[in-house]
Image (cartoon, grey):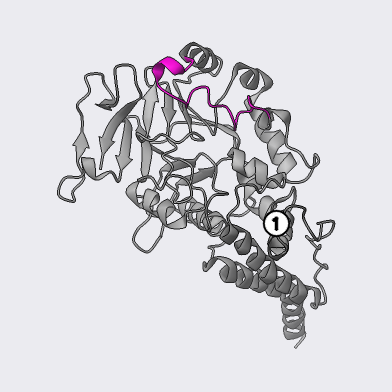
């Protein structure tokens, strides 16, 4: 009898936490349509430097286009027809700009979170990075948000508010913080019908906001995997001398609300590492290869820089003897509606582009195009010295 009373008391003590978990699951499903797998126990911040995996996949800017994002992931063999992770032990790096220009930003954040958890169970790893649009949104700059994107956040707030109200009725749970505290009720220059959506977007994405803290605080700003540096815009000598680990730590602290409203200067200026276009704009003659060489020399073992940010109308390509790899193909319907392409890096086959471009498709089967004379290079595009694509596979 005494044991039964103890068990009953123990179960009762667990009820508030069980209710909280149920409410969170209900809200997540209502917002995203997904049931997220359990998170890994005691997650630790991602390190700035990782060893080379057997397979490394890099994906460019997604900009709120969920379906095209899934197409890119399928192209890389990372998800199946039912959207489940099947990439095994691969390491996947998405170089930022999930937000803005598209209508399903939250759905992509949730979907990537689902894949992160599924990949972890398979020995794989999915890493998301900050782009300039993540930085802008955390600062409250919504110039590139779409009408449907604003509405998506308004709908999120309705569900999130209901969840908090349910939790506040449960004895034994702390009263949830009000994310709307201090958020303006109106915005100059914004039509009245969008004020609720803007308020929700501010509340969700500002430093320590529920969405910023939950999803964006997991992002890195610069990452070294094996001999590849990943960054949204580009690294300059002042960034490497400042310290890559220090940059990641400071930006993460800012997103979590520890250091005020504005991001560090190296994320905000024209030379900020999420804004630089020094290595991603134009052809070989327009790229400062000597500056790139200098930056790579300051990062031990680095052979190349992989970046997004600047749409490459010719698809994924390289300049500076394959040391600058540009992977933003403008796949979102909101900014180019380009054909999905992803970059694969492996120790055995080097650099390879996986593409949906029908030019490289052979009766529906995967085909490899190798017409370049230099090892690791494929199709030559444009005039001599122009951007080049590495080995291409449909």
- At 72% across and 47% down in the image, what residue appears? 140
Indicate whether residue 276 is drawn in magenta: yes
**Quarter of the picture holding the N terminus:** bottom right
Whole-percent x and y of residue 135? 65, 41
Q: Position of residue 90 (x, y in %)?
A: 41, 43
Magenta span covers which residues? 269-288
Above or below residue 77? Residue 302 is above
Along the horizontal axis of the image, is 262 left or right of 330? right
Q: Quadrant of the C terminus?
A: top left
Q: Where on the picture, by quarter, is residue 221? A: top right
Magenta stretch, main secondary structure class: loop
Q: Position of residue 215 (x, y in %)?
A: 62, 51
> Between residues 333 and 272, which one lies in front from this camera angle?
333
Task: Where is residue 142? Give x, y as percent.
Answer: 66, 49
| 330 w.r.t. 118: above or below | above
Residue at coordinates 67% horizontally, 73% vertically from top-left? 23
Observer-nearest of 117 and 323? 323
Residue 203 appears left or right of 237 = right
Question: Does 217 appear above or below 154?
Answer: above
Residue 44 visible in the shown view:
no
Look at the image and say whether residue 16 sits in the magenta stretch.
no
Q: Secondary structure at mark 1?
A: helix
The answer to which quarter of the image holds residue 373 is top left
Q: Going by the picture, which residue comes out furthest to the left?
A: 363
Identify the residue shown where x is 73% and y is 61%.
Answer: 195
Kindly identify which residue carries mark 1. 204
**Rendered position, 98 above or below 221:** below
């Amino acid at each position: 009898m005494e044991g039964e009373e103890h068990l009953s008391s123990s179960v009762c003590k667990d009820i508030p936490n069980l209710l909280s978990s149920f409410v969170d699951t209900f809200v997540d499903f209502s917002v995203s349509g997904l049931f997220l797998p359990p998170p890994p126990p005691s997650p630790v911040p991602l390190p700035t430097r990782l060893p080379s995996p057997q397979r490394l996949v890099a994906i460019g800017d997604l900009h709120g286009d969920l379906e095209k994002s899934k197409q890119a992931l399928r192209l890389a063999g990372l998800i199946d027809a039912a959207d489940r992770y099947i990439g095994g032990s691969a390491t996947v790096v998405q170089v930022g700009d999930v937000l803005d220009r598209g209508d399903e930003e939250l759905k992509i954040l949730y979907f990537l979170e689902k894949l992160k958890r599924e990949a972890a169970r398979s020995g794989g790893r999915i890493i998301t990075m900050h782009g300039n649009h993540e930085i802008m949104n955390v600062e409250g700059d919504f110039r590139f948000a779409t009408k449907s994107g604003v509405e998506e956040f308004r709908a999120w707030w309705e569900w999130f508010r209901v969840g908090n109200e349910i939790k506040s009725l449960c004895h034994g749970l702390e009263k949830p913080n009000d994310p709307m505290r201090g958020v303006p009720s109106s915005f100059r220059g914004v039509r009245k019908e969008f004020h609720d959506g803007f308020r929700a977007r501010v509340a969700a994405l500002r430093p320590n906001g529920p969405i910023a803290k939950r999803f964006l605080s997991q992002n890195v700003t610069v990452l070294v995997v094996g001999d590849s540096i990943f960054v949204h815009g580009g690294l300059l000598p002042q960034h490497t001398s400042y310290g890559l680990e220090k940059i990641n730590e400071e930006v993460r602290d800012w997103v979590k609300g520890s250091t005020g409203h504005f991001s560090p200067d190296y994320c905000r200026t024209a030379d900020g590492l999420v804004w630089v276009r020094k290595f991603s704009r134009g052809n070989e003659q327009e790229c400062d290869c000597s500056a790139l060489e200098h930056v790579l020399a300051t990062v031990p073992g680095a052979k190349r820089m992989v970046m997004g940010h600047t749409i490459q109308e010719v698809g994924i390509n390289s300049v500076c003897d394959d040391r600058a790899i540009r992977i933003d193909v403008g796949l979102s319907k909101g900014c180019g509606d380009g054909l999905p392409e992803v970059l694969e890096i492996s120790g055995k086959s080097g650099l390879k582009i996986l593409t949906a471009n029908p030019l490289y498709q052979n009766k529906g089967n995967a085909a490899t195009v190798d017409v370049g004379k230099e090892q690791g290079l494929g199709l030559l595009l444009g005039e001599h010295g122009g951007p080049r694509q590495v080995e291409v596979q449909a």
